[in-house]
């Protein structure tokens, strides 16, 4: 059997013969740069600010550079590129990796792990008061014990969640982890469906700009719709979308529409590398500016960090607002909505049912004001994660107290760690 080095030697010899009889050509020296020629930009600063006001287009002069090199024939800088391409043909290498598969075959393998999520919740409308609404999204089964990964905005404060499996079977589910600031949520199915096929989780740090990706979800409720695209950029937390400052994002050209939220993005090896979040669009439809939370963020917020989902939704009031509501101590969490079945619901917390405009802000009012929980006083937004971490460190069923202002009276409520 011929060795790898022998084949490479033959290719080198062939390239040398191609160069015979040609006049030597030279290239102008390339300008030196202190930074590597890296296309996996993590953009911030001016570019990120431009994205907030509308889509931006980032281009490089790579096509001119390629044409300049191409005119030199097979010598110079093009020689190692052509050699690499020939070796790739001989040994069957591909840019997507040795495990890359045909998209059609890949879809058949990975689609059984993708689910549709239908949820119902309550919100306070400025004219109608307390109203109910529905949400539809996508998700992916990631464990044999019935864990489903999705987007937080699909499930975070919902009263009822139902997961629809590929065969049409529906299973109730509940939230076990959620981080709205990263748009990530984790559900637990009420029962394990027969024949459930969890997806394989990949490493998003290996993903590079220019790689092909696949997205499966339920755009406009059309379950198991498939689209393909490319990774067009990578964004560090707090750069691409300030409303979700904790998320690291992939930007993709894959088609993303309403209903895709929470669905998985796969690499060409069939591994989940991200969770679909949103798109940026001037028309309301997909315009090639889709954003997907990376698997790195998902692992951290949903699997590694131990903090409890309590079901607290509201606004921290301080200063003048706290004075208007006569809050003892000058601060607290004004509760807007309490999801049914959540730990906050079970302990008896109540949300508001009206809105009021105060100081130019529209605020949900007539709900409880939580002054402290699990021994932590609520002085600012930064105290909410601290409460979640403390309760998350408790054993299941361990009791904790909450000090609450309700209709002008101080009361104490008891809760249990989930």
Image (tube, rainbow, N blue to C red):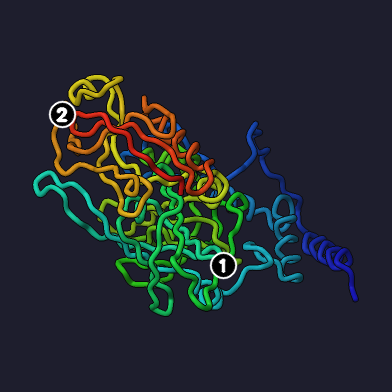
Residue occupying the point 22% across, 38% down: 367
Q: Quadrant of residue 379?
A: top left
Residue occupying the point 40% across, 77% down: 169
Find residue 21 and report its horizontal and vertical position in percent: 79, 60
- Judged from the image, the secondary structure of the residue bearing numbered disc 2 is strand
Q: From where the camera sits, is residue 158 visible?
A: yes
The answer to whether residue 278 is above or below residue 373 is below
User: Residue under circle 2?
Assistant: 358
Find residue 173 and report its horizontal and vertical position in percent: 40, 63
Query: Between 313 and 40, which is closer to the camera in this rendering?
Result: 313
Find residue 49 and report its horizontal and vertical position in percent: 38, 35
User: Residue under circle 1?
Assistant: 144
Instruction: Check disc 2: other Cα within 10 Å, few if <14, some if 14-19, many if 20+.
Output: few
Query: Between 326 and 355, which is closer to the camera in this rendering?
Result: 326
Distance of mark 2 from mark 1, alpha carbons? 49 Å
Instruction: Check disc 1: other Cα within 10 Å, few if <14, some if 14-19, many if 20+.
Output: some
């Amino acid at each position: 059997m011929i060795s790898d080095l022998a084949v490479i030697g033959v290719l080198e010899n062939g390239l040398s013969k191609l160069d015979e009889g040609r006049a030597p050509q030279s290239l102008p020296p390339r300008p030196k740069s202190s930074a590597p020629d890296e296309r996996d930009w993590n953009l911030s600063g001016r570019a990120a600010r431009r994205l907030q006001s509308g889509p931006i287009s980032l281009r490089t002069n790579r096509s001119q550079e390629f044409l300049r090199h191409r005119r030199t024939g097979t010598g110079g800088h093009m020689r190692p590129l052509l050699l690499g391409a020939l070796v790739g043909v001989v040994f069957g290498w591909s840019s997507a990796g040795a495990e890359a598969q045909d998209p059609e075959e890949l879809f058949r393998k990975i689609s059984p792990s993708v689910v549709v999520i239908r949820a119902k919740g309550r919100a306070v409308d400025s004219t109608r008061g307390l109203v109910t609404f529905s949400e539809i999204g996508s998700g992916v089964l990631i464990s044999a014990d019935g864990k489903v990964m999705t987007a937080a905005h699909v499930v975070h404060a919902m009263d009822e969640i139902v997961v629809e499996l590929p065969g049409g079977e529906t299973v109730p589910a509940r939230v076990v982890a959620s981080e709205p600031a990263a748009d990530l949520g984790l559900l637990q199915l009420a029962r394990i469906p027969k024949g459930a096929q969890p997806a394989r989780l990949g490493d998003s740090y290996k993903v590079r700009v220019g790689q092909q990706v696949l997205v499966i979800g339920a755009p406009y409720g059309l379950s198991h719709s498939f689209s393909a695209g490319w990774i067009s950029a990578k964004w560090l937390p707090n750069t691409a979308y300030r409303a979700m400052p904790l998320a690291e994002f992939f930007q993709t050209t894959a088609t993303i529409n309403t209903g895709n939220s929470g669905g998985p993005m796969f690499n060409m090896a069939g591994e989940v590398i991200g969770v679909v979040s949103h798109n940026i669009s001037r028309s309301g439809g997909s315009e090639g500016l889709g954003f997907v939370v990376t698997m790195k963020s998902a692992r951290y917020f949903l699997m590694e960090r131990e903090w409890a989902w309590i079901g607290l939704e509201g606004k921290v009031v301080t200063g003048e607002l706290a004075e208007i509501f006569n809050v003892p101590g000058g601060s607290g969490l004004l509760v807007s909505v309490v999801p049914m079945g959540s730990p906050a619901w079970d302990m008896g917390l109540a949300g508001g049912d009206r809105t009021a405009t105060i100081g130019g802000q529209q605020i949900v009012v007539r709900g409880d004001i939580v002054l402290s929980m699990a021994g932590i006083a609520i002085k600012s937004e930064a105290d909410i994660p601290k409460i979640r971490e403390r309760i998350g460190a408790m054993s299941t069923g361990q009791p904790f107290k909450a000090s609450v202002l309700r209709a002008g009276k101080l009361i104490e409520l008891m809760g249990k760690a989930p």
